[in-house]
Amino acid sequence: MSVVDAPGFILAAPIQVSRRRSATICVSGGAGFLGSHLCTALVERGDDVIALDNFHTGRRANVEHLMGTGHFSLVEHDIVHPLPGDLPAFDEIYNLACPASPVHYQSDPLSTLGICSLGTRNMLERAVHDGARIFHASTSEIYGDPDVHPQPESYWGNVNTLGPRSCYDEGKRFSETLIYEYARRYDVSTRMARIFNTYGPRMQPDDGRVVSNFVIQALKGEDITVYGDGLQTRSFCYVDDLIAGIIGLMESDDPIEGAVNIGNPVEVTVLDLARIVIDMTHSSSRIVHRALPQDDPRRRRPDIGRAHNMLGWAPTIALCVGLQHTIEYFAREIASGDLERGMAERGFIAA
Ligand code: NAD
Ligand code: UDP
């Protein structure tokens, strides 16, 4: 069975995101993988976007193409500190700032906890001050290693509070509670997506995530590193689908309480993903097995009924199509030398 035919794959027309009026929008984490795609979509619609980023895992190059538009600016700022006072009042705030890959969020766990707590609170304070609606990027990680499958929003999760992933899982759970309490106490309009594994161009090559690792390894003819037996599953959403989903959630006029799963319900094993990538890149790479990281979730698949019913949203881009875009992106990065240059700049390989 091809992944496109897999049960649960829903084909729907892509949602058309059209705004009523242009707005002034803040995107924290705007120079990151998802943030840069979000900023691009908003600027293309005619919004004025100010991205805040401390470049911990993001890079200026991700938003270079927006610099001359007259509708975009990039402010270096760490969200654990209150937002600079000289920014304009915002109509909308998207809070995406936070390292997202296990390698990065575990590299400084206390910082990750600070971003999820103090950082989220600072963004909420600004939303209250400006009367802005705020979107928060939560995660499927709040379900931990789930014993309910697929995962609906009503599932409370199965998270180890004392492990290497806890700083992120528990940090994001704390963020959700902050959002919930600010909505109740200050009547601030909030939107919250639980984002499932998302992939596409501008993923960082050195963040250790499975799609970027496998694609780069396959393109270079290196061994493909499958952790454990590779029978653990993930459900991969292409970035364009994800961005359409979160903008649709932010723009919805209906009051939306709580969190909404945004992801692609087509579930694949990590081993099958390795085989698909080898196939698509015509690579000579071998599959090798490495130790499974502690607390690595065994399976993950979103129940997207809520997003479908409330927003009319469903992903439209099949895994093989999204992977093709991603492979082409990394092939270009490798051919131009940008991949190595970027990794050397970030200290991942010797310059
Ligand atoms: P990313 O690491 O590429 O982007 C995060 C951005 O936030 C980077 O530009 C980074 O420099 C910036 N940042 C980090 N700490 C900051 C701070 N203290 N102040 C200001 N900026 C800071 O990650 P991403 O994949 O784009 O993820 C974006 C958001 O989506 C994160 O909140 C993440 O938890 C969430 N998310 C992503 C996925 C996914 O599959 N990509 C899945 C679930 C949730
Ligand atoms: N993984 C793997 N090889 C790699 C990188 C990741 O087998 O080179 C596995 C990892 O153990 C996990 C899955 O792929 O089971 C997804 O990992 P990723 O870090 O992309 O995301 P997350 O674990 O946060 O879902």
Image (cartoon, rainbow, N blue to C red):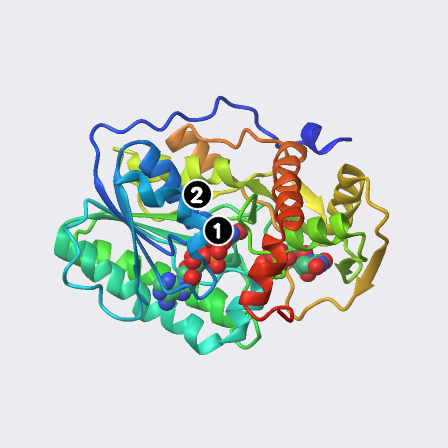
The residue nearer to you, when weighing 218 against 250, is: 218
Q: Is 283 placed left or right of 52 in the picture?
A: right
Question: Tag 2's secondary structure?
Answer: helix
271 with respect to 30 (left or right): right
Residue 75 percent coordinates (x, y): 29, 58
Q: Residue at x 59, y 51 (%)?
A: 148
The Cα atoms of the two marked residues, 2 and 1, are separated by 7 Å
* Rendered-image quadrant of the N terminus: top right
Q: Nearer the viewer, residue 151 or 35?
A: 35
Whether residue 298 appears in this view of the structure is no
Q: Amino acid at mark 2?
A: His
**CB of mark 2 within 8 Å of CB of mark 1?**
yes
**Where 268 falls versus 3 (above or below)?**
below
Q: Is mark 1 within 8 Å of ligand 1?
A: yes
Under mark 1, the amino acid is: Phe
Residue placed under numbered mark 2 in the picture: 37
Check mark 2 vs ligand 1: CB closer than 8 Å? yes or no: no
Residue wearing tag 1: 33
Q: Quadrant of ligand 2?
A: bottom right
Q: Name which residue lies at 25% across and 33% down.
A: 253
Closer to the camera, 93 or 235? 93
The crowd level at tag 1 (other Cα within 10 Å; few <14, some 14-19, many 20+) is: many
Q: Residue at x 38, y 31 (%)?
A: 311
x, y percentage for residue 225? 77, 59
- Name the side, left or right, on which 72 lies relative to 337: left
Report helix, strand or loop for mark 1: helix
In the picture as drawn, the residue positioned furthest to the top comes out as 13
At 81% from the left and 39% from the top, the residue drawn is 282
Residue 66 in view here: yes
How far across and down, in percent of the image, does residue 149 sit? Answer: 61, 48
